[in-house]
Image (cartoon, rainbow, N blue to C red):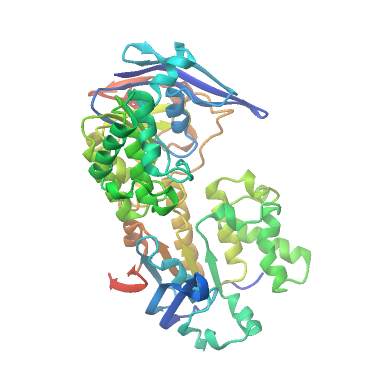
Amino acid sequence: MLKIENLKVYFKTDLGIVKAVDGVDLDVHKGEKFTLIGESGSGKSVLAVSILRLLPKNAEICGKIILNGKNLLELGEEEMRKIRGRTIAWIPQSQSSLNPVLTVGFQSAEPVIEHLGLDKKSAFTKVLKIFDFLGIGRNRAKDYPHQFSGGMRQRILVAMGISTSPELIIADEPTKGLDASKRAQIIELFKKIEDKTMLIITHDLNFAERLADRIAVMYCGKIVEVSSAEDFFNEPLHPYSKGLLDSLPSRGLKPIRGFQPSMINPPKGCRFRERCEFASERCKNEPPLVSVNGRFVRCWLYD
Amino acid sequence: MVDLSGVGYMIKGIGLRKVFKSGIFGSKAVVAVDGVNIRIEEGETVALVGESGSGKSTLGKILLMLIKPDAGKVIFDGIDLTKLKRKELRKIRTKMQLIPQHPDEALDPRWRIYDSIAEPLRIHKLVSSKTEEENLIFELIRAVGLKEEHLERYPYALSGGELQRAVIARALTLNPKFIVCDEPTSMLDLSTQASIIRLLMDLQRKFNISYLFITHDLELAKVIADRILVMNAGKIIDEI
């Protein structure tokens, strides 16, 4: 359904060119919950924002983002505006994305009126139904964002996202800043929205484990592994994936040595090479993305 | 070099209570901590878990006497801190420290990392010369896994993990015996979290520090703590 081919997003800065996304290929199937994980600064949010073409002006983008056969990068701004919120919904990180001076009911109805062409009244009816469905409660539609807790605000953002029945939902770190019990509630909430295609960006591995169908791991602007969630948590392929899992408290709390390299001057060859315990001479060359039993991994160990 | 080893102290809170009042004449009252008894042995790690708003951070700050409790006692090294005068309290404060949740907000953005770490030494007049100060700080910075080049930088030029290490170094300058860690890793990546936690545990073994570790990550609490206290609506409701 969504196909990304050789996507590159470079930012021009005073310090040099930051290669935030550097040759990414991805394939999100219809109806699946696809999760993109990686540390902060790995480029995962930039990748998501570039699908909506909401990058800042100093960004250069090339490659292909194909949604239902159309290359989004070739569309005009007006066509793109119709896709944003209608075909692709964006669920941003919680904190400040809601407008503080509008009631949450009004904010959630706005995209419905704008994109589906409903009149005010039926738009509100639709929104109230969604509010009930997501456990916000229709009686709270007239409240303002500051009257809600963090978990509730996240629910409202989800409500807003699904209100136009989009084909693809992109959620950016939906559990960030929430405590354990709220996190569990948000997971349940996402499970409820079954039939939608979702691209979820997170570094919360628990969240990914309980929700994802497939997982892609991003490291320093590149995808290093794509696996089904089950395979990933049972037997991660890429050394970086292994390192990530081992740093979980329940799996030994072992940190990965070293630091993430700079994206202005990433190391040649495999970008994880300097932190990898299996690194060898071969790793000085760029490893290919190899297929292993239906999974993909970018590492010489599997060549 | 200030001696960083030695015996630890035990800290105890008895019948602690704190009510925050707001509104006209305190018409709206929130009971943040409600009759809490807590005891942390020397060299022990006690994890405090609970939802946001359950009073975990307030309790931590009361034990450090950064918030004065409305009722109850805080006993540290055999002394009741609630009875002390400001000046006396200040002396004891060198033995207790806070590692906050947001390292980026804990350091002055216009100060070099070096000055932020040196400030406690200067305030408490613990070093007599510039060289002594430098030696001590270099030693601290190595203990937390930073390099000397980091000292000349400003907070914006450090990553989240590096900042948190700098904050830990600052907390250690005064040779504390009790540290309240208020969700020190909730803003960090997994791998960085693992290395910061390892660091805190190493330091504990070396210097016999007691920790009150505030978190809402139960998994993490299980791994690092000797005991876990569960807090809800101002009360400690369970011990695991």
Above or below, A277 relative to B219 = above
**Toward the viewer: B35 or B30?**
B30
Picture quarter with the C terminus of chain A:
top left
Q: Residue at x 26, y 39 (%)?
A: A130
Q: Quadrant of residue A161?
A: top left
Above or below, A84 relative to B16 = above
Above or below, B214 relative to B188 = below
Pinpoint residue A174: horizontal percent, then vertical percent: 37, 42
**Toward the viewer: B14 or A103?**
A103
Pinpoint residue B231: horizontal percent, then vertical percent: 34, 69
Q: Residue at x 44, y 57 (%)?
A: B197
**Toward the viewer: A249 or A38?**
A38
Q: Residue at x 42, y 79 (%)?
A: B17
Q: Residue at x 52, y 26 (%)?
A: A55
**Toward the viewer: A197 or B148?**
A197
Pinpoint residue B21: horizontal percent, then vertical percent: 48, 73
In the shown orientation, is residue A281 left or right of residue B107?
left
Q: Quadrant of residue A64?
A: top left
Q: Work out whether residue B166 can be spotted.
A: no
Above or below, A148 relative to B231 = above
Pinpoint residue A270: horizontal percent, then vertical percent: 46, 27
Picture quarter with the N terminus of chain A:
top left
In the shown orientation, is residue A187 left or right of residue B194?
left
